[in-house]
Image (cartoon, helix red, strand yellow):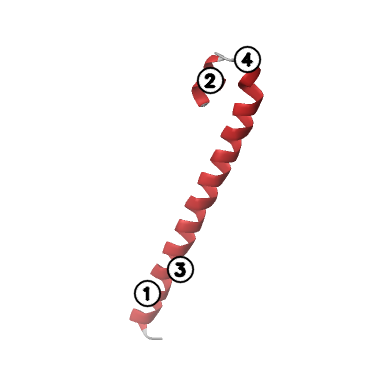
Amino acid sequence: MFYIVMVNTSPGWGDLTSIIGYLFIIIVGTVLALVTEVLSYFIKTKLIKNKKV
């Protein structure tokens, strides 16, 4: 998909593939952000339990 946009092999499909590529990047970024947030939550709760404040 990115190859089609960058090399311009199909000029008629450029807009569609650009939109799909943009949505794909947004979805991947959101999933990575959620995974990072869940990992940081578990790490923080584990550190707090070990600290026993």
Determine the secondary structure under disc 1: helix
Q: In which quarter of the image is the C terminus?
A: bottom left
**Separation of disc 4 and disc 1 at Cα?**
54 Å
Q: Residue at (42%, 71%) from the top-left corner?
A: 44
Q: Position of residue 29 (x, y in %)?
A: 52, 46
Q: Earlier in the sequence, mark 3 or mark 2?
A: 2
Q: Is residue 2 above or below residue 35?
A: above
Which residue position holds label 2? Answer: 4
* Amino acid type shown at disc 3: Tyr
Which residue position holds label 3? Answer: 41
Which residue position holds label 1? Answer: 47
- Check if mark 3's residue and mark 1's residue have beta carbons within 8 Å: no
Q: Which of marks 3 and 4 is nearer the N terminus?
A: 4
Q: Nearer the viewer, mark 3 or mark 4?
A: 4
- Check if mark 4's residue and mark 1's residue have beta carbons within 8 Å: no
Q: Which of marks 3 and 1 is nearer the N terminus?
A: 3
Q: Residue at (51%, 54%) from the top-left corner?
A: 33
* Amino acid type shown at disc 4: Pro
Determine the secondary structure under disc 4: helix
Q: Earlier in the sequence, mark 4 or mark 2?
A: 2
**Separation of disc 1 and disc 2 at Cα?**
47 Å
Q: Nearer the viewer, mark 1 or mark 2?
A: 2
